[in-house]
Amino acid sequence: MKLIYEKSQAGRRASSLPRPDVPAVEVPEELRRAYPPRLPEVAEPEIVRHFTELSSRTFGIDTGFYPLGSCTMKHNPRVGERVVNLPGFRDLHPHQEDEGAQGALELMWRLQEILAEVAGLDAVSLQPAAGSQGELTGLMLMRAYFADRGEERDTVITADTAHGTNPASVTMAGYRLQRVGTDARGNLDLEDLRAKVDGRTAGLMLTNPSTLGLFDEHIAEVAEIFHGAGALLYYDGANLNAVCGISRPGDMGFDIVHYNLHKTFSQPHGGGGPGGGPVAVRERLEPFLPTPTVARDGDRYRLHYDRPRSIGRVRGFGGPFGVFVRAYAFIRLYGPGLREMSETAVLNANYLLARLREAYELPYERLCMHEFVLSARRLKREHGVTALDVAKRLMDYGFHPPTIYFPLVVPEALMVEPTETEAKETLDAFVEAMLAIAREARESPELLKAAPHGRPVGRLDEVKAARRVVVKYGFEEHPDLSAEPIPTPRALEAQKGA
Amino acid sequence: MSFLSVTEADREAMLATIGVGSVEELFADIPQGLRLDRDLALEPALSEPELVAHLEELAGRNSHTGSELSFLGAGIYDHYVPAVVDAVLQRGEFLTAYTPYQPELSQGILQAIFEYQTAICELTAMDVSNASGYDGATVAADACYVAKHVTGRQRVVVTEATNPQVRQVVKTYAPGFGLEVVEVPHRGGTTDPDEVRTAAEGAACVIFQQPNFFGCLEPAPDLAAAAAEADALPVAHVDLISLGVLEAPGNYGCALAIGEGQGAGNYQSYGGPHYGFLAAKSELTRRLPGRIIGETTDAAGERGYVLTLQTREQHIRREKATSNMTTNQTLLALAGLVHLSWLGPQGLRELGETCMALAAYAKERLALPLLFPERATFKEFAVRVGRSGPEAIRAARAQGVHPGYALGRDYTGLDDSLLVAVTERRTRADIDRLAEVLGA
């Protein structure tokens, strides 16, 4: 398919703009643009067709089942799109005076209160733009907290099952990373932990349930170990969809929590974003929260900046407001029934697990929470078929593949998260496809190796893309990569998803 | 619940397959003492019509740019969002997809981001753009992280005439990065290249804004040269909408171009979600944060697009990654691409000229003392209103006009000054009305 730049014809345009009756003004010559940017020159019909065709080459939840583990690809209620486009929200300037933004501020205040209740903690900042920024914010809060107490602590501990964002955030926050292992039941290795936690430890970052989809059975002891050493516990909310209304991170002993509004509370993922990553904290960390938060005085709401020990601002304005509107709408449709959301997510995951555990290997023999991890290790050993091949073949059956090659502690990992919004028929169809693929792996492995079939492209050469870097259209000088010798395309057997 | 499809009969059958007697048993691994023994203390569920009524009521209590004549800017602007942007963003395939980890299922969104990267590179005259950052403030912190690693230096310079929120975010991130932040003051609304040259000695980068926060046109090529002389990376924070008329940062020596993308394709939305853009010269490619889409081929030689240079990223490189970023702002960046495609080069230039001409007319028409009378401006300018900014705003809002942003919020000594923004959505008559209200 052509790029929009390849459809461009000099002299075409889609835009019509006002030409007000005021004198023209010249840009000072030394600052004036010398050559125009080569934006597409296309009329509106071409724009609509172009992007409609691109959308038809994109798989979303609206297209089909999308069990991408740890990403919580649930249905996005369309009422969210309706309410976010109310002019009072959509066309509200972020510098509008508080008196002119009372409705927006009330919505944010209500969301803060709801999130505090869901986490079992005391105070919330809505500001972080995404989960990973929520993580970084949480670590900055740790830094500020210990600096305020005059304590020098330089180490943060993460699990070996952690999302890559955890260690990356640790480095960005200026901490040293220490890893703790996983025991035979998929919990944190308590002995390893006891040996590593000391007076230099600032805290733990943990996802619970973990990326294995398992609830840590010793979480109370884990919290004791850290709190006993004066350290803090950070809850990565990536998997909060398992436990809303069932068990609260604050009650588990966590001091700081980030939420993923785009996962648990159904902000559409938009092809990669936007997200929302609010953080909640225990009272003793509240003085350090980013500013502004929203405060209520009687029946008036205002942006609250007066927080002298705040870590400062982590993004512009009060946060991604449109994401708040959708998340708030989603939560209000459930009310306390959020518990049913999590129960159904866990039911769906366990049902899939029960039906797939024979055909694929299950590394930890337990019930799962909202997701589970299988291994294609046996298929690889016996038939040379990898997790990547299984993933690609699933596309032929009309499904988006699960997350693969993550978590790293499970070889040939397939991480499946069905979410609560899928019907039993869909889960059954997915099971049938997975079982058929396991059979095909034995009988006709080449079918899997050559998958997917009938897509706009076959398996793409990711190694070539990384070596021969073409990251924008080059117009007249655009290279013809198809003319360069192609060995077998190399798709990286590296983490895809989560 | 209307989003759940599991019936009572389904539940029974599923529990039987799992081999447990109740949903409760699925949570056996959660120690009893950690389970919530009550309902969440949330208000009762609303039906969809009740929810919409509730949110309409909340939205109705906000003064938006359709209900109030607004000259607010200061980083977020009331530019016209063409209908075709809404139409594309409503495509459920784009709306409900996630990061394109599986390229064969995601060629559409991958190609769209590749086209976005191309548009950003064309506008800024850079070689490589990432797939978006969170917003115009966080991309400045990203740029500092790049500069720290490239130069090995521990200080960054930001001009005081750069958006205060951008500076605040840089200062929040800096301690974790091991960076010290130095600010260079403005002199009469713009920055002195000689002062930048001195401050840039031993610095990793120099961040300046063009047009700057006051709306003034900086001597940008001189600022970039001053930074480069000290081997600090010159970083320009620019407005995409200005780049049809103002020179591109890559053409005057900048190593990185960053900014807030909102003006291209996004509604104001009380501050987000929007997108930040970050583009660089090719030598910085492997240090950049965030997703980058690259072109490649399949076995048949067919062209296709993939997430590339992933060894920079957190899911591969973990604690040694160039950033912790995963979720970005793809949908908002897509909106930017559609808006820019709608404008085309001619439209973008006309849009810049129109904003600039309207702003110039407003400067004349208001007949108030300009804060920086010597300086050329783009679509925004600062005026003295003869009383405190918040007071002037209150008085004007009582007459249905929001006259602009109170600069006293960020700058000492500017308590009597407002920053007035004029986009193509304001008319000559609107400006006359503003003059009337502020003159009163």
Image: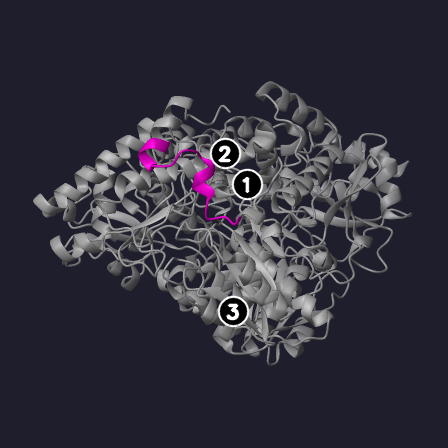
* Residue bearing mark 3: A171
Contact, mark 3 vs mark 1 (Cβ under 8 Å): no
Task: Name the element at disc 1.
Answer: loop
The magenta stretch is B15-31
For marks 3 and 2, give the one nearer the viewer: 2
Q: Pointer 2: residues within 10 angstroms few (<14), some, or many (20+)?
A: many
Q: Pointer 3: residues within 10 angstroms few (<14), some, or many (20+)?
A: many
Quarter of the rendering occupied by the N terminus of chain A: top left
B313 vs A149: above or below: above
* Residue bearing mark 1: A244
Q: Residue at (88%, 36%) from the top-left corner?
A: B395
At label 2, which amino acid type do we have? Met
Q: CA distance from mark 3 to mark 1?
A: 30 Å
* Residue bearing mark 2: A341
Q: Nearer the viewer, residue A45 or A190?
A: A190
Task: Name the element at disc 2.
Answer: helix
User: For residue B24: magenta?
Assistant: yes
B15 vs A243: above or below: above
Contact, mark 2 vs mark 1 (Cβ under 8 Å): yes
